[in-house]
Amino acid sequence: MLVNHHLITRQHGFSLMEVLITILIVSFGLLGMAALIISSARSNNIAHYRSVASKQTEDIADRMRANRAGLIAGAYDALAANTPNSVDCVANACSETQIATYDHAQWNATNAQLLPAGVGTVDGTVAAGYQITLRWIEKGMNEADLTCPDGVPANTRCFVTRFAP
């Protein structure tokens, strides 16, 4: 029996086209994994900043509670985003108003250290309660944060807390 070798052909190994398609599929998978890792790192960074903001709002609220006389006198009613000059109330004896200024300076100095361009404000009264607002720059955020007051740049994140002493 004669066998025609031209009719029976066996494939040995992979063709170049199959190898290229496999490399293409694997590279898309690796790009997807890289995007997932970058997104995860960004979300972790955002969560860290929110955690810091939460602790910083607790810090100023605790400072306000500790200086009850300054709170009642209205020394905390309108803390602006600036960091005021103050007397060192740890080393010196201070009045209630000086303690409030010292608290304000220490708090906003720490906000600037812990959050990118971080600043905080406090508005309110003892009777009505206080609103504590922390703002910081968040890279990659292109929309406006609805919790921020009007006129705040689009890449600014705000953390707002209500506080009743």
Image: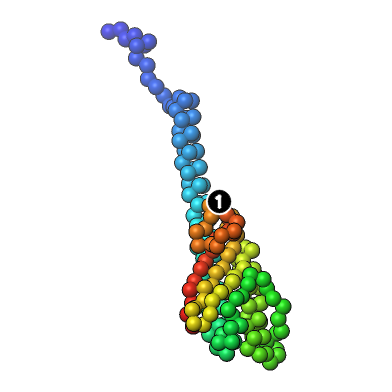
Furthest-bottom residue in view?
93
Furthest-top residue in view?
2
The one nearer the camera, 42 or 92, is 92
Please provide percent x and percent y for residue 52: 54, 69
The one nearer the camera, 95 or 149, is 149
Residue drawn 52% across and 73% down? Answer: 131
Residue 111: tell me if it is visible. Answer: no
The one nearer the camera, 132 or 38, is 132
The residue where tag 1 is placed is: 142
Disc 1 marks which amino acid?
Asn
Q: Is residue 67 above or below residue 52?
A: below
Q: Is residue 61 above or below residue 1?
A: below
Q: Is residue 133 above or below residue 142?
A: below
Name the quadrant of the N terminus: top left
The one nearer the camera, 53 or 21, is 53
Residue drawn 41% across and 24% down? Answer: 12
Residue 43: tell me if it is visible. Answer: yes
Residue drawn 48% across and 79% down? Answer: 128
Residue drawn 51% across and 47% down? Answer: 34
Q: Quadrant of residue 91?
A: bottom right
Furthest-left residue in view?
1
Horizontal side, residue 124 vs residue 106: left or right: left
